[in-house]
Amino acid sequence: MLPQLRADQARRVVRADLRYTNGFAIVWQDVPAPTPQEGNT
């Protein structure tokens, strides 16, 4: 499961709560989209 969670380039796992016997909870953080660098056209 972890490889699928880490494959999402638009979001980053901030915190994973694994205390639950029936599953888990994840806190996500959006990753800003890369911006073109100045001088590249």
Image: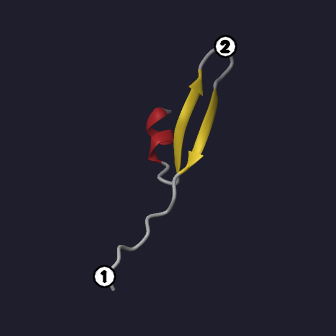
Element at badge 2? loop
Question: In this picture, is 10 found above or below 36?
Answer: above
Front position in the image: 1 or 38: 38
**Quick one: quadrant of the C terminus?**
bottom left
Q: Residue at x 58, y 45 (%)?
A: 29
Front position in the image: 37 or 5: 37
How packed mark 2 is, by other alpha carbons closer than 10 Å (few <14, some 14-19, many 20 or more), is few
Residue 39 found in image quarter: bottom left
Which is closer to the viewer, label 2 or label 1? Answer: 1
> Tag on residue 21?
2
Q: Position of residue 18 (x, y in %)?
A: 59, 19
Q: Position of residue 20 (x, y in %)?
A: 67, 16
Name the kind of residue labelled 1 in the image: Gly
Q: Which scheme is used to colour this image of the protein?
A: secondary structure
Q: Residue furthest bottom?
A: 41
Q: Residue at x 53, y 38 (%)?
A: 13
Asked if labels 1 and 2 touch by Cβ distance under 8 angstroms, the answer is no
Question: In this picture, is 28 found above or below 41?
Answer: above
How packed mark 1 is, by other alpha carbons closer than 10 Å (few <14, some 14-19, many 20 or more), is few
Name the residue beneath numbered marker 1: 39
Q: Residue furthest left?
A: 39
Q: Residue at x 64, y 24 (%)?
A: 24
> Tag on residue 26?
none
Q: Position of residue 25 (x, y in %)?
A: 65, 28
Name the kind of residue labelled 2 in the image: Thr
Q: Residue at x 62, y 35 (%)?
A: 27
How many marks the image carries: the answer is 2
Q: Position of residue 11 (x, y in %)?
A: 54, 48
